[in-house]
Image (cartoon, helix red, strand yellow):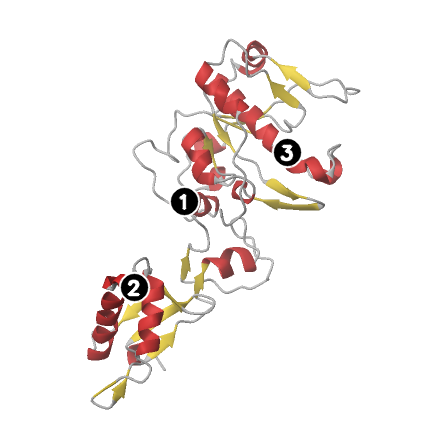
């Protein structure tokens, strides 16, 4: 059945219709469907029911309902072209832009950014996948005056870190990067992280950290790992990258503690738009350094709120 022959066609959400993307013809039966949805959401016994529950409950109620001998006609939109977030991002292995472990060459028409909780996490995921174009008044992408720093989380198999402490060390390196960024007035471009627990596959920050809470503390101080690939980022930024690093002795096995004064002496005069500090897992910044204000120091010393990929 073609879409034009249906009263309602919708994106399929694993086990039911997704109310976030539907095509509805103004037929008597489709109007009745939405009247039933309104009645369901207005009923005290259904208080708290969401629009998707109401839609599918109303569809079930209308299975045997007819209007002048006709029944409500529904159609599931092509599942390869209209995809829910669970299937597109997780089940297909797309944790980063253009990643596709399934090998499918089909390009979807619509991706519903669901199966992840909070608006902040949804925006972060869209940005990570280069699906977000809004620049905002602060020129999130297009600023030619803002400076950045980035770094890399090396493959756990090639580092001294054990599988059990990979995540902790990478989150500690993130705090180091945020501290350096604060001192140098540079926005941190996130690296890719690793899953840990003997799993060295790469993952985005929301695999380990609750994004809404992270944004409450560090909003505006970081960018997603794919940031420099975004078409709105100026070439003057993309082409001004300088590789630097904290110098460690070759035979040094322990972490080093660096002061804010050290950071300013080493990198304070660098004028590249992006400085890449490589691996930061063995570098610690003294959060009690006099160059840090008390408020930011407390942010660095507080633990990150941990979470799962879907942010539950």
Question: Which residue position is annotated with label 3?
Answer: 168
Q: Earlier in the sequence, mark 3 or mark 1?
A: 1
Q: Which mark is residue 94?
A: none
Q: Residues within 10 Å of mark 3 (few under 14, many from 20)?
A: some
| Residue 49 screen position, x and y as percent | 33, 61
State which tag comes first along the sequence, 2 or 1. 2
Q: Secondary structure at mark 1?
A: helix
Assign a secondary structure to mark 3. Answer: helix
In this rendering, the answer to whether 72 lies above or below 274 is below
Q: Of discs 2 and 1, which sits in the foreground?
A: 2
Q: CA distance from mark 3 to mark 1?
A: 25 Å
Label 1 belongs to which residue?
123
Q: Secondary structure at mark 2?
A: helix
Name the spot of residue 77 as percent of width and height, x first. 39, 71
The residue nearer to you, when weighing 114 against 262, is 114
Residue 302 image point, x, y percent:
52, 26
């Amino acid at each position: 059945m073609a879409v034009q022959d249906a009263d309602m066609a919708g994106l399929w959400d694993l086990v039911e219709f997704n109310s976030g993307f539907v095509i509805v013809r103004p037929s008597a039966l489709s109007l009745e469907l939405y009247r039933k949805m309104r009645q369901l959401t207005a009923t005290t016994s259904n208080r708290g029911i969401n629009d998707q529950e109401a839609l599918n409950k109303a569809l079930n109620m209308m299975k045997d309902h007819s209007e002048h001998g006709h029944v409500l006609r529904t159609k599931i939109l092509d599942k390869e072209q209209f995809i829910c977030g669970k299937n597109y991002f997780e089940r297909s292995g797309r944790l980063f832009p253009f990643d596709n472990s399934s090998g499918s060459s089909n390009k979807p028409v619509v991706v519903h950014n669901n199966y992840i909780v909070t608006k902040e996490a949804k925006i972060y995921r869209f940005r990570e996948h280069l699906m977000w174009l809004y620049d905002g008044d602060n020129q999130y992408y297009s600023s030619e005056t803002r400076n950045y720093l980035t770094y890399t989380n090396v493959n756990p198999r090639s580092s001294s870190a054990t599988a059990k402490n990979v995540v902790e060390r990478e989150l500690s390196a993130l705090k180091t990067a945020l501290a350096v960024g604060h001192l140098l007035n540079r926005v941190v471009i996130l690296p890719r992280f690793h899953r840990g627990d003997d799993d060295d596959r790469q993952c985005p920050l929301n695999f380990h950290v609750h994004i809404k809470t992270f944004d409450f503390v560090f909003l505006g101080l970081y960018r997603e790992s794919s940031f420099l690939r975004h078409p709105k980022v100026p070439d003057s930024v993309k082409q001004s990258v300088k590789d630097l690093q904290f110098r460690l002795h070759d035979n040094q096995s322990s972490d080093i503690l660096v002061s804010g004064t050290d950071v300013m002496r080493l990198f304070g005069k660098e004028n590249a738009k992006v400085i890449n500090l490589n691996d930061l897992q063995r570098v610690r910044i003294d959060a009690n350094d006099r160059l840090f204000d008390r408020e930011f120091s407390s942010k660095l010393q507080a633990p990150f709120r941990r979470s799962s990929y879907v942010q539950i």
